[in-house]
Amino acid sequence: MEDFNHFRYIIVDECHGINPQGGMYKDFFDCAARKILGLTATPYRLSASLQYTDSNGRTVFRPKDEHGSQEFDDKLHSREITAENKCILKFLTRTRPRVFHKVIYQVAIQTLLQRGYLSKLNYYDMTILPQEGLRRNSTGMDFDDRSLFEEYQRVNLQDYLVSIIKRLQQPKSGIPRKGILVFTKFLEESEALCKSIDGCEMLSGETKKKDRERIINDFKSGKIKVLANVGVLTTGFDYPELDTVVMARPTMSLAMYYQILGRAIRPHQDKEAGWIVDLCGNIKRFGKVEDLSLIERKPGEYIIQGIADNQCKQLTNCYF
């Protein structure tokens, strides 16, 4: 760390990836006094949290003073207050401990669209798997894998996904899609696509580097028409010509949702609009990315607001 002590400024790209609780970044930041500038399109982090509810179903919070906290614990023990694993999407300037303290510049997605820096998106909600009946995992931050698998079997997601891809390959306009990128939760759905769709290949964390490079190059050249992936192309995949993204997996993470949609939002002269096809209730949960806005409710206190399920909703610093 001493080799870097003379640096006065640090610029961190994709700064939402910094864990405020500790780790390599925090050690580096703390080793000397310096200015830190973070850059990100998704200024929030998903955190596990307990939501406390009283006997009337109202959300309550643990008092900060010792006496109140003890009284709170007594009610928790007697079940006058119940606790449930939930998650909170925290805006980066409101994490504890804080790494970033204020927003010095922001630009709305709608503004970038109007200026041509981003491509228009068309949204198609083809949900077969509603999220309301899914169980959460032990952290409360995502859906339980077993619950997901059971629901996939119940609604026959694999066959539905195959039918959707076949429909996308035969558009009414007669103009073929430039490429169809599919996001799945499990290997089984991607494997089913490869067996049923000609010109389809898949990527996962198990794909060897040389095979991954070949598959991505073949997809960009048009040799591969459909590319299914299991959690590997949410970031770092740049293909502006891509015009179709299929979300065949649910997520509780606004950042992941944004990143997946971001694969189709890059502008290209031959692309009129990117298509977002959602099979798992994500559009209903988060809405359109161009409707996201940064609101300063009071000095220094920011939230992300969006239009989800046809309602204006606060999406950060609230339980969900």
Image (cartoon, rainbow, N blue to C red):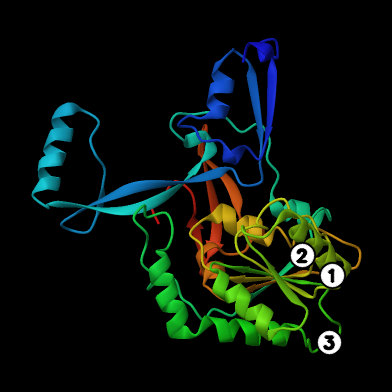
Q: Which residue is mark 1?
A: 272
Q: Looking at the rendered structure, which numbered label has been put on residue 107?
A: none
- 232 or 37: which is nearer to us? 232
Q: Is residue 155 visible?
A: yes
Q: Secondary structure at mark 2?
A: loop
Q: Quadrant of residue 219?
A: bottom right
Q: Secondary structure at mark 3?
A: loop
Residue 93 lies, in percent from the top left, at 52, 34
Residue 11 lies, in percent from the top left, at 70, 28
Residue at image location 78% in from the left, 79% down from the top = 199
- 30 or 225: which is nearer to us? 225
Residue 10 lies, in percent from the top left, at 68, 23
Q: Is residue 278 visible?
A: no
Q: Could you tell whether 34 is left or right of 268 in the image?
A: left
What is the distance, in whole Å, between disc 1 and disc 3 at their CAs? Answer: 13 Å
The answer to whether the residues at label 1 and label 2 have Cβ atoms under 8 Å apart is: yes
Residue at image location 64% in from the left, 19% down from the top = 35
Q: Could you tell whether 34 is left or right of 49 in the image?
A: right
| Mark 1, other Cα within 10 Å: few <14 / some 14–19 / many ≥20 | few
Give the amino acid at mark 1.
Glu
The answer to whether the residues at label 1 and label 3 have Cβ atoms under 8 Å apart is: no
Q: Which residue is mark 2?
A: 120
- 280 or 308: which is nearer to us? 280
Give the amino acid at mark 3.
Ser
Q: Earlier in the sequence, mark 1 or mark 2?
A: 2
Q: Which residue is mark 3?
A: 173
Quarter of the rendering occupied by the C terminus = bottom left
Q: Earlier in the sequence, mark 1 or mark 3?
A: 3
Residue 224 lies, in percent from the top left, at 81, 73
Residue at image location 62% in from the left, 75% down from the top = 191
Q: Earlier in the sequence, mark 2 or mark 3?
A: 2
Give the amino acid at mark 2.
Lys
